[in-house]
Structures are given as C-alpha cells and as structure tokens.
Image (cartoon, helix red, strand yellow):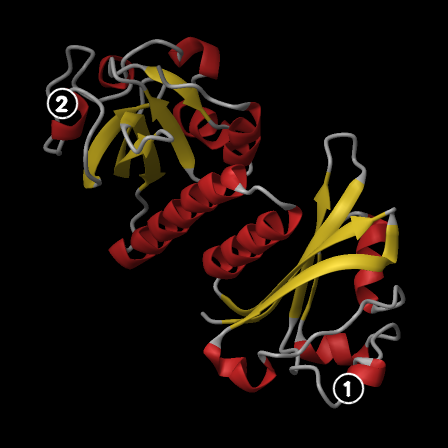
Amino acid sequence: MLEISNDLKITLDLLSTAIFLIDRNQTCVGMNAAAATLTGYSPRELDGRSLQEILLYGGHGDVPASHDKSFFEHPYPRDREMRGEAVFRHKNGTPFPVAFRACPILDSSQNASGTLLEVQALELDETQATLRKRSERLQALASASLAITAATSLEELLISVTKAAQEIVGVHQATVGFLQNNSWSSLIAVNLLSDKYKEWQDFRASPHGSGIYTMIGETNKPIRMTQAELEAHPRWRGFGQYASAHPPMRGWLAAPLVWKDDRILGLIQLSDKMD
C-alpha cells in the first residue's frame, strides 16, 4: 500500500509543478496544491478515483483527441520512467494539452509501490528542454527526500539537504546551516563547492554570529541579491578575517529553514547560479 507522509505532502505543496501520486490500483491517492489549481479538482474529489476516468480527455464520452494515453491504460506500478503528452479536461469542461512524466515510487526494499506523475500544462512557447529541466529537478527532489529521510545523523542530514539544494537549483556554491541553542554564533554548517571553486574546497570557517546571513533570522524570509547589491550592502563585510581565504560570492540567495510553528531552524545559502 502506498503511504503518503505529512512531510512529503508539505514538500509537494511547495512545488509549482502539478504532482499526482498513483497507487497499484491505478487510482489517485494524493495530489499537491499545483495539481488542484491545474485541474480545478480538490484532493478529496480525486482521492481513490482513476485519473483516466476523471481527467483524461475522451474519458467522458468525448471524441478522443490525438494524444498518448498509453500510460493511463497500463496497470501500476510502472518499472521504468515514462514520458508523453496528453489532453486533460478541467473540472469546468475545458480541454488543455499537457506533458507528463511518470516514474515509480520505490519503497525501502526498492520495490515499486506506486507512481509519481508530474504534469505540466503546455503553452505555445513551451519547449521540451524546459520540461526536461523541470523533470530533472523533480527527480532530484524525490531522490533528496529519500536521502533526507534515511539520514541517521545531523551531519548526514545537513549534507543531504545541501547536496539537494545545490543540484536542484543548480549553483556552484551551497551552504546549509543549523542553529544550535538558537544562536547564530554556534551555527553548524555544511559547505559544498563545484569544481569551479576547487581551490577553495578545503575552506572552513567558524560562524561568528554577525554576518549578513543573520538577517534571515530577523526577517524569517528569503533574501536575494546580485553580486553588486551584496557588496554594496552595509551589513556585508567582505568575509572579515576570512577575506583572503573565502571563495568569492557571485550573487546570493538565502532562505530560512522553518519549523511548523514558524521557529527558525537554520538557513540555506546559494551563490553563483550555473544557468
């Protein structure tokens, strides 16, 4: 039986891409907020029902459109990734083209327990390259979720989160910090650098609790700056005592890690986007 954890539900709702979770019986057992927006249906309305029956154009007695619906006609779980295009029907009756990507959901024994279905509405200017990039990021997020769940220590957890942030966003520098005793000066941090910064791979710095990153704790909101904005900011100190050893920062994006009661647990910092 495919079980959906609360953590996974929260993670999927953060995504802008529509996601459906399908069980072995080919019925919907979960969807994120983007899927509800895309289709007009609430999770409760689709729970336990076949997407082919409800959403696929042609499943309502309509004349079938010319599209690939083979994925929706096969039993689950799939043992491989599958991509294609289809025509969905919105709750209000409006048909619209979509691109989809389906991949098996594996349990701890590496057995498929269901299918994760990613659906993207196709616009006139949509390119397959864009869809492929979004799919790759989703796949990276799914892999990261499994790694995070399997982490057995705080260090392993932070490394998994940092790798995920670096890969999904596509940056040369990624740092994840975890607050100890609610103090920025006792931040536990993991830094990952691409080969572009290989001469700084051994850089290690102890947080002193007064850097620009502490702004995250004050606002509890993401902050994004270009390299020029960062260097001109009054709270930017050019790394202080670490100026000669720290890798250069080419832009900066920082976001808080927040507990469900809005208490800040730490932050993610990213710099130098690859694309």
Above or below: residue 185 compared with residue 221: below
- For image coordinates 80% across by 55% down, the residue present is 216
Q: Position of residue 103 (x, y in %)?
A: 27, 36
Quadrant of the image containing the N terminus = top left
Q: Residue furthest bottom?
A: 244
Disc sitting over residue 74 in the figure: 2
Q: Of residues 156 and 169, which is closer to you in this image?
A: 156
User: What is the crowding at mark 1: few (fewer than 14 residues within 10 Å), some, or many (at least 20)?
Assistant: few
Above or below: residue 32 compared with residue 43: below
- For image coordinates 37% across by 27% down, the residue present is 20
Residue position for label 1: 243
Disc 1 residue type?
Ala
Determine which quarter of the picture holds residue 59. top left
Q: Position of residue 67 (x, y in %)?
A: 13, 34
Disc 2 residue type?
His
Determine which quarter of the picture holds residue 104. top left
- For image coordinates 47% across by 71% down, the residue present is 274
User: What is the crowding at mark 2: few (fewer than 14 residues within 10 Å), some, or many (at least 20)?
Assistant: few
Under tag 2, what secondary structure? loop
Q: Of residues 80 and 40, which is closer to you in this image?
A: 80
